[in-house]
Amino acid sequence: MVAVEHHLMHRIFILGPQGSGKGTQARKLSEFLGIPHLSMGQLLREEAERGGELGDKIRGYVDHGVLVPDEVAKLVLVKRLEAPDARAGYILDGFPRNRAQYDGFQEFDQPTAVVVISISRETSMKRLLKRAEIEGRVDDTPEVIAKRLDTYERETLPIIDEYRERGIVRDVDGEADIEEVAKRIQKLFVL
Ligand code: AMP
């Protein structure tokens, strides 16, 4: 398969609930299209490691698994988007997560496509509990996972609907295995 539309700058957002594999799929699509993968969580962790006033502030939130303030997330993202490699396009996962972030990004730019990976609550719960078992995380309890899924449904799904009305949403069933989902996503971006 040959990726097309190289002349067109891809600005692809990948969204989906916890456990949908959006980070993994964003990385795979990034390799396929040859444009950088930006992970909002990763960008914030890097900024926290850098320290300084902004980094220290971010670390306080990230370490507790709480969303950093929307303005801070936007600041870090916009700074990264201004780097030269992102001028050829990019794939972004983990942003926007709520209305304020959606509105904040609108002022800056527009995505060319929003890939939404959907899985059932049951699959999400099953995958996260398995991951928690492997990584030995104590904060991935069924109660906390349920709360995060509630937040996704309450805050992120409505903004996906906004993108849907603009005709740029591409839905992908995320129940299949990683390679199959990756193939389905690639097909959205080839002739
Ligand atoms: P993740 O790598 O997606 O699990 O994100 C790790 C952490 O980064 C989260 O617990 C939040 O503290 C922060 N984070 C990630 N994405 C966002 C976002 N869009 N807005 C605010 N904070 C975020």
Image (spheres, helix red, strand yellow):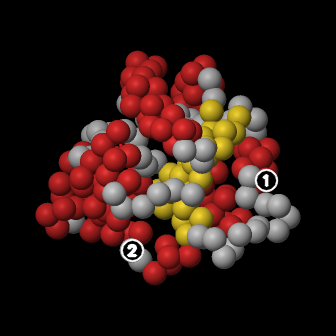
Q: Nearer the viewer, residue 43 or 108?
A: 108
Residue ID for mark 1: 187
Determine whether the residue tagged by mark 1 lies in a helix, strand or loop. Answer: helix
Question: Where 144 falls versus 36 (above or below)?
Answer: above
Question: Where 46 falls versus 121 (above or below)?
Answer: below
Instruction: Tell me what residue is drawn at x 75 percent, y 39 percent.
Output: 177
Q: Is residue 56 left or right of residue 31?
A: left
**Mark 1 CB lies closer than 8 A to ligand 1:** no
In the rendering, which numbered label is found on residue 155? none
Q: Amino acid at mark 1?
A: Lys
Residue 58 image point, x, y percent: 23, 54
**Residue at the right extreme, as displayed:** 1
Q: Amino acid at mark 2?
A: Glu
Residue 114 image point, x, y percent: 57, 48
Q: Nearer the viewer, residue 45 or 2?
A: 2
Instruction: Tell me what residue is drawn at x 19 percent, y 62 percent.
Output: 54
Residue 184 image point, x, y percent: 77, 47
Q: Nearer the viewer, residue 140 or 80?
A: 80
**Residue at the front extreme, as displayed:** 166
**Residue at the bottom extreme, as displayed:** 84
Q: CA distance from mark 2 to mark 1?
A: 28 Å
Crowd class of label 2 (few under 14; some 14 to 19; many from 20; radius 10 Å): few
Q: Nearer the viewer, residue 162 or 58?
A: 162
Q: Is residue 130 left or right of residue 76?
A: right
In the picture, the quarter occupied by the N terminus is bottom right
**Residue at the left extreme, as displayed:** 53
Say if residue 132 shows up in the picture: no
Crowd class of label 1 (few under 14; some 14 to 19; many from 20; radius 10 Å): few
Residue ID for mark 2: 82
Question: Where 42 falls versus 64 (above or below)?
Answer: below
Q: Is residue 10 left or right of residue 72?
A: right
Marks 2 and 1 in Cβ contact (< 8 Å): no
